[in-house]
Image (spheres, rainbow, N blue to C red):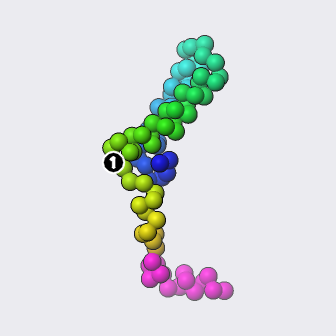
């Protein structure tokens, strides 16, 4: 999906921005067409690529905690109690 774990989001957004700029400068396409191309390239393409190429989904990550209670400094935990 569109998440930080999807490696196809940033390249797709960069390509979409270039395509939008090119469509604005080089064609007489309407605003609706340009926004449609932008949404398709930045929103749909990374999701499709992630599913086709076997990327993970955020649903698979929910069971894994980011930090356990024992991680980090003991002093950092004490500062939250104050």
Q: Is residue 66 above or below residue 10?
A: below
Magenta-colored stretch includes residue 78? yes
Residue tagged by mark 1? 54
* Along the line of sight, the residue nearer the viewer: 37 or 24: 37
Q: Is residue 1 above or below residue 16?
A: below
Picture coordinates of residue 43, whole percent (x, y): 52, 39
Picture coordinates of residue 10, whole percent (x, y): 46, 42
Magenta-colored stretch includes residue 34? no
Picture coordinates of residue 45, whole percent (x, y): 45, 36
The residue under the point 55% across, 31% down is 38
Quadrant housing the C terminus: bottom right
Whether residue 54 is visible, yes or no, is yes
Whether residue 14 is visible, yes or no, is no
The residue under the point 58% across, 28% down is 36
The residue under the point 45% across, 43% down is 47
Q: Is residue 66 above or below residue 74?
A: above
Query: For the residue labelled by badge 1, is the local secondary structure a helix, a strand or a loop?
Result: loop
* Mark 1 crowd level (few <14, some 14–19, many ≥20, 10 Å Cα): few
Would you say 71 lies left or right of 38 here?
Answer: left
Q: Is residue 35 above or below residue 56?
A: above
Outermost residue on the left side: it is 53
* Along the line of sight, the residue nearer the viewer: 22 or 51: 51
Picture coordinates of residue 48, whole percent (x, y): 42, 40
Q: How many marks?
A: 1
Magenta residues? 68-82
The residue under the point 46% across, 57% down is 58
């Amino acid at each position: 999906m569109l998440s930080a774990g999807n490696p196809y989001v940033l390249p797709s957004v960069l390509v979409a921005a270039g395509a939008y700029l090119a469509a604005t400068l080089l064609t007489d396409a309407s605003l609706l067409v340009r926004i449609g191309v932008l949404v398709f390239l930045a929103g749909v393409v990374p999701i499709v690529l992630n599913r086709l190429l076997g990327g993970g989904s955020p649903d698979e990550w929910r069971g894994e905690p980011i930090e356990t209670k024992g991680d980090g400094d003991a002093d950092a935990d004490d500062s939250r109690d104050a």
